[in-house]
Amino acid sequence: MIFQMQPSEVPADRFEIYRFAGFPPKVLPPQNICNLAEECMNQLRPCLRPNLVYETFQKSDLEPIISRSKNLSANLEGCTRVVMFAATIGAQVDSIIRTTQKIDAAKSGMLQATGAMFIESFVDVFNKMISSQYGGSTKPRFSPGFGDAPLDLQKHFFNLLPCSKIGLSLMDTLIMAPEKSVTAFIGIL
């Protein structure tokens, strides 16, 4: 199934941008940093293409995948079903960041942080929707590359989900394109 949002619907959290940019949580950075973050949000928001594909599986059908990680297995303990999803905010965000890297390193870094905030915010909205759909009986999402979960688990998302429908591909390096993308498991109790 596909889940989409309009760019204007994706929540923006300035403190998350600051955190992704390396500032202490919940601490307001200097005004010039706040201004740069605001500029980056305004530049990226119209370019967002928030798209996500997902499917719900019986946990037992995913055991060969899940069992490759003790941390993932622990996260999904007690679950009967698992939602697997792949999400992106689109290729144009990557393009803007790459172009800016050549001319303004500080702004490029803030654009990276802003893009990270937008993809996480989009995925958070989806996560809340799934949790609500199942009466709050879900586990926190868990992504390949987190804890002891090998990054090559990404391949399973691309084998089991129609990721190309949202313009998402997996490179040989196991990095997704566009880069501002997320794959994750959500356990359903």
Image (tube, rainbow, N blue to C red):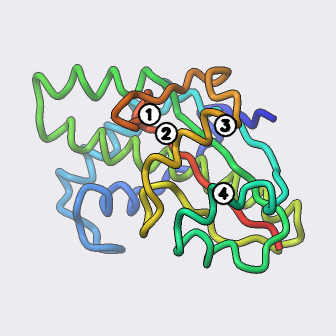
**In the rendering, which numbered label is found on residue 181?**
2
**Mark toward the start of the polypeptide (4 vs 1):** 4
Image point 36% across, 74% down: which residue?
26
Considering depth in this image, is 134 or 142 the residue closer to the camera? Answer: 142
SS type, badge 1: strand
Q: Is residue 87 above or below residue 20?
A: above
Q: Is residue 158 above or below residue 109?
A: above
**Label 4: few (<14), some (14–19) or many (≥20) C-alpha neighbours in 10 Å:** few
**Label 2: few (<14), some (14–19) or many (≥20) C-alpha neighbours in 10 Å:** many
Instruction: Tell me the mark number nearer the camera, choosing from 3 and 4.
Output: 4
List the residue tagged with mark 3: 52
**Label 1: few (<14), some (14–19) or many (≥20) C-alpha neighbours in 10 Å:** some
**Residue 155, percent across and down?**
54, 39
Instruction: Tell me the mark number nearer the camera, choosing from 1 and 3.
Output: 1
List the residue tagged with mark 4: 64
Furthest toward the front, the residue is 64
Mark 1 and mark 2 residues within 8 Å of each other at the beta carbon? yes
Can you tell which quarter of the image residue 83 is in?
Answer: bottom right
**In the rendering, which numbered label is found on residue 53?**
none
Instruction: Tell me the mark number nearer the camera, choosing from 1 and 2.
Output: 1
Distance of mark 1 from mark 2, alpha carbons?
7 Å
Image point 71% across, 78% down: which residue?
77
Distance of mark 4 from mark 1, alpha carbons?
23 Å
Quarter of the image that includes the C terminus: bottom right
Distance of mark 2 from mark 3, alpha carbons?
9 Å
